[in-house]
Amino acid sequence: MDDLDSLDRKILAELSANARIPIAELARKVGLSKTPVALRIRQMEERGLITGYRAILSPVKLGLTHVTYIEIRLSDTKQRALEQFNAAIRAIPEVEECYMIAGGFDYLVKLRSRDMADFRRIMATRISTLPHVSNTSSHVSMEAVVEQNWTPN
């Protein structure tokens, strides 16, 4: 990010707020013409700064209001076991985020479900049956105080 100028940062901020913004409107907002904006976007895509465009869905409107964070400890942390766990957790659609952690447990998972009964079903049929899982600890979110997509400063 250090080699981005202020115009690139403005373009990224606008695109992260609205990836469907027309190039003409984006150019107007950042103070350039359409061609240089399109060129800058293409260069940022080629450099891997922009990795794609997607729709951001509302979990609340989709009925996925129950958020649980799950600490997972594995029985084996050799490379093969980690690869097996990683592949299996990626296949669970209710898993919104999963991070390998350095500390008292191996993974931290953010899971969205409809309600407690749905969460219990997912835990019993999917999370607990993942390869090499030895222990889990769940923390139910009561309220999202800050929840947003990342945007560049």
Image (spheres, rainbow, N blue to C red):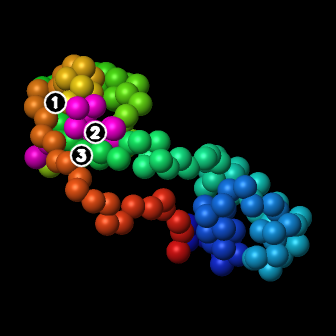
The Cα–Cα distance between marks 2 and 1, rounded to whole angstroms, is: 26 Å
- The answer to which quarter of the image holds residue 100 is top left
Q: Secondary structure at mark 2?
A: loop
Amino acid marked by disc 2: Asp
Q: Nearer the viewer, mark 3 or mark 2?
A: 2
Q: Quick check: 29 left or right of 148?
A: right
Q: Is residue 114 left or right of residue 20?
A: left
Mark nearer the N terminus (2 vs 1): 1
Residue count near mark 2 (Cα–Cα under 10 Å), binned few <14, some 14–19, many ≥20: few
Looking at the rendered structure, which numbered label has been put on residue 20? none
> Which residue is pictured at 55% across the width and 49% down the height?
56
Q: Is residue 69 visible?
A: yes
If you read the primary sequence from the N terminus, does the residue marked by circle 3 or circle 2 appear first?
A: 3
In the rendering, at what x and y percent does residue 119 appear?
Answer: 25, 34
Q: Residues within 10 Å of mark 3 (few under 14, many from 20)?
A: some
Q: Which residue is mark 2?
A: 115
Q: Quadrant of residue 40?
A: bottom right
- Contact (CB < 8 A) between labels 3 and 2? no
In the structure shown, which secondary structural element does the residue marked by tag 3 occupy?
strand
**Exactly how many numbered labels are in the figure?**
3
Can residue 117 be found in the magenta stretch?
yes
Residue wearing tag 3: 69
Rounded to the nearest angstrom, the CA distance separating label 3 from label 1 is 16 Å
Does the magenta segment cover residue 132? Answer: no
Magenta residue span: 104-119
Q: What's the amino acid at mark 1?
A: Leu
Q: Position of residue 121 (x, y in %)?
A: 24, 25
Q: Which residue is mark 1?
A: 74
Gap in Å between the C-alphas at discs 3 and 2? 14 Å
